[in-house]
Amino acid sequence: MFSIKNLQYRYPNNEEDTIKGIDFEIKTGEIFGLLGPSGVGKSTTQKILTRQLDNFRGEIRYQDKSITEYDKNFYQDIGVGFEMPVHFSKLTAEENLDFFKKLYSSRADTDQMLKRLGLYSDKDKKVGEFSKGMKVRLNFIRALLNNPRMLFLDEPTNGLDPKNARIIKNMIAEFKAEGGTVLLTTHLMNDVEELCDQVAFMADGKIVEINTPKNLKLEYGSRQLKVEYSDNAEVKEANFKLDDLGENQKFLQVIKNNRILTMHSQEMTLDNIFIKITGGS
């Protein structure tokens, strides 16, 4: 869907580049996570790919055609969910959606999405009266209202309660299942692990690692199994190497003769991988 080669960008009056020569590809039908601490260039990259910023250096191809060759019809293909929802606060939710629908030739059934995200009963309420979570949900609907092929999402579940975050994640997964492609930026590593096919970690304007969440956890984790068990009413724990687990006599004795309380493989969490790779917090 997107191919990016040696992308560089410097804001006017800055002395150095914000984006310092990055390369990555987003395959059609995948969810690609662009991760990193604040200020490393994630939002700038999204703005370039959505053609909000020009004067970049390097090559960006969308659908195997240079992004600079597209006219404004490019925007018919994409949906964008900004981190900070931008709405007309004096208009109702429905009036906001109707306004933006007029910009597109294809228009989704927003009533169905309003119902699914629990906003239908508030569709005639002014958005200025909405809570932050309601604005986030409305923002997500707006990103989908033109039936896009490519979706850019920045912190789509940030600030939402677990129920509504789950609905949005399900909708993102359904969008992918129907052939859609997603570029996702978030600091919520649970969302990344659940949704993303590939992730790229950015640091200081560069991409420092690209891999699948599973491969990252295997690469950076420890191949051990931690077992907590009860031994004569005393809670004990032991660690065993995964590579010879079936032949480890101590492990076999523990699981045969004791009540097992917990078992956990010791792969590193994506939060810790994030910190290790990027140096972020």
Image: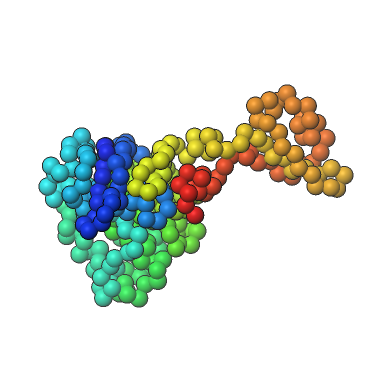
Residue 54 coordinates in the image, percent (x, y)? 18, 50
Residue drawn at x 55%, y 45% is 269
Residue drawn at x 47%, y 40% is 213
Residue nearer the viewer, 52 or 116: 52
Residue nearer the viewer, 44 or 169: 44
Residue 254 coordinates in the image, percent (x, y)? 79, 35
In this rendering, is residue 126 above or below 4?
below
User: 7 left or right of 241?
Assistant: left
Residue 66 coordinates in the image, percent (x, y)? 17, 39
Q: How many marks?
A: 0
User: 249 left or right of 15?
Assistant: right
Residue 175 is at least partly visible in this image: no
Residue located farthest toward the top when viewing the structure as drawn: 247
Q: Locate residue 208: give its quadrant.
A: top left
Residue located farthest toward the right when viewing the structure as drawn: 232
Residue located farthest toward the front when viewing the structure as drawn: 15
Residue 230 is at least partly visible in this image: yes
User: 124 left or right of 248?
Assistant: left
Residue nearer the viewer, 124 or 184: 184
Residue drawn at x 30%, y 47% is 19
Q: Locate residue 123: give its quadrant.
A: bottom left
Residue 236 coordinates in the image, percent (x, y)? 79, 44
Chosen colour scheme: rainbow
Residue drawn at x 28%, y 50% is 17
The quadrant the N terminus occupies is: top left
In this rendering, is residue 75 above or below 264?
below
